[in-house]
Amino acid sequence: MSHASETVNDVWSVIWVGIVNEIWKHKNSIIFNRGVEDVFEVFASMQVKVWFWIVAKSNSDYFPYLVGF
């Protein structure tokens, strides 16, 4: 397996974990804290969390955040 495909797999893994984590947290907020369903909040939180995780794993000095990708 090449380094590029390992990197792509790592990014997809981070995206998957970010999606599942934010949905889980939002579900718990609704159930246990009487939170309100807000798909846009979940999506925005997911984007930011995944972006931070990818930047943390990245060796790059520049990794822009694109809103609404």
Image: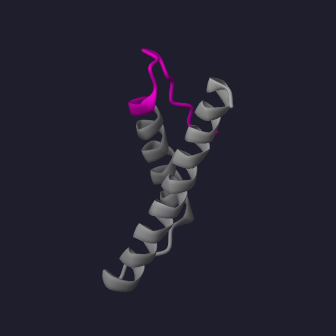
In the picture shown, does residue 16 fall above or below 4?
A: below
**Residue 20 spot, x, y in % from top left:** 52, 63
Side (left or right) of 3 relative to 60: right
Query: Residue at the location (56% across, 64% down)?
Result: 39
Give the farthest residue toward the front: 1
* Residue visible at 48% across and 58% down in the picture: 41
Asked where in the image residue 61 lies, by quadrant, the reply is: top left
Q: Is residue 21 above or below residue 35?
A: above
- Determine whether 10 is above or below 20 in the image: above
Q: Nearer the viewer, residue 56 or 46?
A: 56
- Is residue 68 in sight in this rendering? no
Magenta stretch: residue 62 in it?
yes
The secondary structure making up most of the magenta span is loop
| Residue at left offset 40%, top offset 68% | 25
- Residue 45 placement (x, y as % from top left): 45, 52
From the viewer's side, name the closer residue of 24 and 8: 8
Viewer can see residue 51: yes
Q: Residue furthest left?
A: 33
| Numbered disc total | 0
Residue 38 locus on image (x, y percent): 51, 67
| Quarter of the N terminus within the rendering | top right
Q: Quadrant of residue 53?
A: top left
Magenta stretch, residue numbers: 55-69
Q: Image quadrant for the C terminus?
A: top right
